[in-house]
């Protein structure tokens, strides 16, 4: 059911080191199904809702800094948040302490932590022109060393209390699926009652939801490709057809009977043209 993602072994390694082999197995199962399930779907589409929350958090923290980074896609946060920072933090004491914090918190907390790290680098980031997204991405994708972990954790907790996910600007939270761990871990009391079977049900629902969305995107892309392909021939046929119709009408109007019939048909033809154009227009441009 669950799909491996690059960096998953870094997470499990921390559990093995801290808990030992026997206790790590059930812990890894619960963590995988109930806390990082979005990253283990058949595709990586589940990560998009996580990354799209980051700009909203940054805007809540510092609108000026957020605007400065607006040309840089939030993929710079993928490696760190995907692996719960286990891929980047090597010191045993630091990663164990961070896991204590992250696993006892909602699944959105790693994003808040990343926003705090970005905030702590504001001066460095503002020194780089905002129209250099590659440079900004390169810097942001690497965590600063050393990390002042305790102060970062404290600031993250404060930020989460000040700007909880449901209060973020741009209706970012409303676009998150109800089946995402971002929402199913939002209430600690409800999370404590969830079972592995619940996680499996949520996994299947979200996988089906993402498949429908991906299928729709592919169909839409295919329609647009077909529209572009046949755009000129369609226009040529339209203009050519219009010329033929004009000739026929001119011939028909030579007698009064034709004028009478045509006059009664014009409103119908006009409505048909408008309806057809309304259907075709989105695909011709």
Image (tube, rainbow, N blue to C red):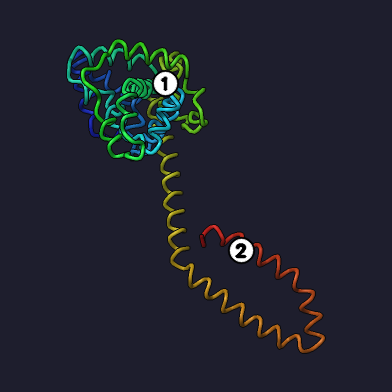
1 and 2 marks in contact (CB < 8 Å): no
The quadrant in which the N terminus is found is: top left
User: SS class of the residue under badge 2?
Assistant: helix
Q: Is residue 1 visible?
A: no
Other-residue count near label 2 (Cα within 10 Å), few / some / many at <14 / 14–19 / ≥20: few
- Count up the numbered dots: 2
Residue drawn at (38%, 29%), measured in percent from left and top? 200
Say if 19 sits above or below 107 in the image. Answer: above
Look at mark 1 in the image and give the residue it sits on: 185
Q: Image quadrant of residue 253? A: bottom right
In this orientation, which residue lies closer to the viewer: 280 or 195? 280
Horizontal side of residue 170 vs 145, given as left or right: right
Task: Judge depth for marks 1 and 2 and give the one in front.
Answer: 2
In this orientation, which residue lies closer to the viewer: 86 or 170? 170
Q: Image quadrant of residue 102? A: top left
Look at mark 2 in the image and give the residue it sits on: 277
Say if 202 sits above or below 221 in the image. Answer: above
Q: Position of residue 77 (x, y in %)?
A: 31, 30
In this orientation, which residue lies closer to the viewer: 8 or 244? 244
First-in-chain label (1 vs 2): 1
Residue drawn at (76%, 89%), measured in percent from left and top? 254
What is the CA distance from the residue labelled 1 to the residue labelled 2? 48 Å
Q: Where is residue 125 in the image (x, y as percent from the top left)?
A: 32, 28
Horizontal side of residue 275 vs 63, given as left or right: right
Q: Can residue 45 be seen in this view?
A: yes
Q: Where is residue 116 in the image (x, y as percent from the top left)?
A: 35, 20
Residue drawn at (45%, 44%), measured in percent from left and top? 213
Q: Which mark is residue 24?
A: none
User: SS class of the residue under badge 1?
Assistant: loop
Q: Position of residue 124 (x, y in %)?
A: 29, 26
Say if 219 sits above or below 80 in the image. Answer: below
């Amino acid at each position: 059911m669950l799909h491996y993602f690059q960096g998953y072994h870094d997470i499990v390694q921390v559990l093995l080191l801290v808990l030992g082999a026997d206790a790590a197995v059930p812990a890894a199962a619960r963590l995988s199904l109930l806390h990082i399930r979005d990253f283990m779907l058949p595709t990586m589409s589940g990560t998009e809702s996580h990354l799209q929350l980051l700009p909203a958090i940054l805007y809540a923290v510092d609108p000026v800094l957020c605007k400065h980074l607006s040309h840089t896609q939030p993929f710079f946060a993928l490696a760190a948040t995907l692996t719960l920072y286990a891929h980047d933090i090597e010191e045993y004491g630091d990663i164990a302490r961070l896991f204590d914090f992250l696993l006892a918190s909602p699944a959105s907390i790693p994003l808040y932590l990343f926003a705090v790290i970005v905030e702590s680098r504001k001066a460095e980031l503002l020194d780089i022109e905002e129209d250099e997204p590659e440079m900004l991405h390169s810097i942001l994708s690497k965590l600063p060393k050393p990390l002042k972990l305790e102060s970062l954790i404290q600031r993250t907790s404060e930020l989460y209390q000040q700007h909880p996910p449901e209060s973020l600007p741009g209706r970012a939270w409303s676009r998150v699926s109800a089946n995402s761990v971002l929402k199913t871990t939002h209430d600690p009391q409800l999370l404590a009652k969830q079972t592995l079977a619940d996680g499996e049900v949520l996994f299947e629902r979200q996988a089906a939801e993402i498949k429908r969305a991906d299928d729709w995107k592919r169909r839409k892309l295919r329609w647009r490709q077909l529209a572009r392909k046949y755009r000129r021939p369609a226009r040529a046929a339209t203009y050519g057809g219009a010329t033929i119709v004009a000739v026929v009408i001119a011939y028909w109007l030579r007698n009064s009977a034709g004028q009478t019939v045509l006059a009664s048909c014009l409103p119908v033809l006009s409505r048909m043209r408008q309806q057809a154009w309304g259907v075709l227009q989105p695909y011709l441009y």
